[in-house]
Amino acid sequence: MTEEVIKRIRERYFGVPLLALGQTVFWDEPTKIALKYWLDRLYPEAVFIFGVHNTDYFAKSPIASDRDEYILISHNDNSTRDLWASTVEISRPFGSENHPTLQFFRRCNVPLDNIAPEDRKNEFLDEITSCWGWMALVKSGTRSIVACDVRLQDVLERLLEIIEWGTCGAKDLIGEKGCIRDFCDRIREFIVDYADKNRSATVTELFKELYKWFWRELIGYVPQDIPLTSSLELFKFNTETYHLPRFSIIEGFLNPSTSSIYKNCYNAVVKDSGIYTLDHFAYGAIPFDLVIPGRERGTICIQPRALIVEGEEEIRVPLDSPLTTLKDLAEVIERNFGKDSAIVGKAVVLLSMIRSEFILVFNERGSLYYNLTFKMEELLEKEGIDMRLYPILRLRYHTWDLIDRIDGEIVLPDYMRIAFGKERIDPREFKDRWRDVVEEQNHFIYKLANMRKPREIMKFLSEIRGKEWEERLSLYNQLKQEIISRREPIEKNWQIVREMKERLREIKDPIERRTIREQLRRLRDDTWKMEKSEEIKRLREELRALEIESERAKAEILRYSYLVKENLPYTNCRPSAWWFIAMDPSRKWFKSIAENLKIYTEGERCKDYNLQRCIQ
């Protein structure tokens, strides 16, 4: 499969550069170097470019901090629900940003609002809906900053802190092995040394150097034939670059004869997706942002007499005449903002921009938007637009199928122990079982979600967690029995009350009715006092406490099960490069990852395979 795909790419697209563009080096971007193993053997002439995607906003915190400009934060479905992380994020082995949602618990019949502690409701909701083993560095405050503008010195302390946090996770999994501490010390030393020698460096510049550091660790050398760039450099838009194929799709939104077609297709695709349609912005908006380094990033809005950059600061440039060509746009931007500004497509059109000139390299399950991109391209083709776009090249790893290459037992994270039925596991057993365990979780979640009665839940918990819940179930039964016993005279009274009511319906004599009503009132009052006695109240409170405790335990196990079924397949596809370095000093694991790499293409839209025609 891999050999066939690379040979086909070489035959059809000889000379077309391959581009790997990612926001952070602490996740799965450097892992893409595994593709080099196959290119060297089957397509040595290939140009393989790595780039730092630094034209998005640096992640912004949904939680304000009065003390720190940059803070570390995790993701949940409560206080950090709206978090969108970029640039600096890290996952411990088996960890990811995936987290259970409040809706997931509602579907599983868990009344979170009712079981949350009164004095720490938000903290409880944060914890129960939190991801596991993932952390991001985000900017606090009201003003955003584009990633290309973030200075290394401003985030250095927090950057070192997040690396320490991540590597501690690896230590927890395989113990106090020297390779973990050695990895942590060496990468910290490299970053600190680089920061000391390059006081004015940006995070982007550090990331370019870290790519080389990771490659040297993973494959033993730094390939000299891999250019390193950034999205700010790739999409630099001026009078010298506007003619490049990567900008060709912008022309469709500018040209009066096609503008409405492009905008309508874009709006049709993003409607109801959570992405803003163009009418959310100022009049004349197109789905591209202008990035002005050191100043602003905002949506480009082209009006008859003005070019507007709609960001946190609105920038208005008067026009003598409408902008209808890329050359017109380039001249205006260069004249007003210089040669270093960049035009970057919003999420859906960015992939089309890139694929006009590059074969885009994604790990499997990379990009949330590619289906919308393909749908937009299909709509444009139906409108008669000739789309000439190169494919996406997907890399499929077998991370957990090859984990038996590492030595020693793995100490499983807490969330995986119930699913695997143990705390420690041999890598060979993990390799053989992990897919089956993931499959089992859907049945497990369905079974647990349908348990509604407290006794049923506690019985299940006693099977899962043993003696502690056997004792709680026994206590629950005792409390139930004691309440029943103490309520026997109360129930007798309530029975008399019901009988007196029936009798009252049959009596016609007013005096007798008044007498019975008075007797009924006194009996009802006395019975309510018995019902509300301190002893029965205490028993009910103990009973309710156990019920709440069991619901919380149910919620916790559901969270664990959710994380297993989501995290393991996801991290199998998107492993962080540093895991292979920190957990396996022999590098056998990563070598096997590269040798067993599977690749495939999608989104191919060059109708013929003549390179020159496709990129005209």
Image (cartoon, helix red, strand yellow):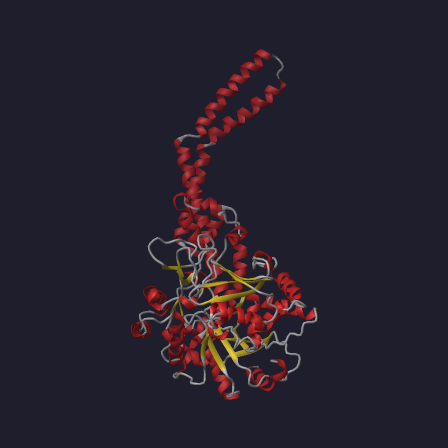
User: Residue 93, can we see it?
Assistant: no
Q: Position of residue 597 (x, y in %)?
A: 51, 79
Q: Quadrant of the C terminus?
A: bottom right
Furthest residue in direction front, as rendered = 320
Q: Where residue 159 sits in the image (x, y, percent)?
A: 35, 66
* Nearer the observer, 456 or 385: 385
Q: Nearer the viewer, residue 616 or 77?
A: 616
Q: Nearer the viewer, residue 29 or 480?
A: 29
Q: Is residue 15 visible?
A: yes
Relative to 495, 96 lies left or right: left
Residue 136 x, y percent position in the rendering:
41, 63
Q: Position of residue 168 (x, y in %)?
A: 34, 66
Instruction: Name the foreground residue: 582 vs 154.
Output: 154
Residue 254 image-quadrant placement:
bottom right
The image shows a total of numbered marks equal to: 0
> Residue at image x 35%, y 72%?
201
From the viewer's perspective, tell me whether residue 137 is left or right of residue 110: left
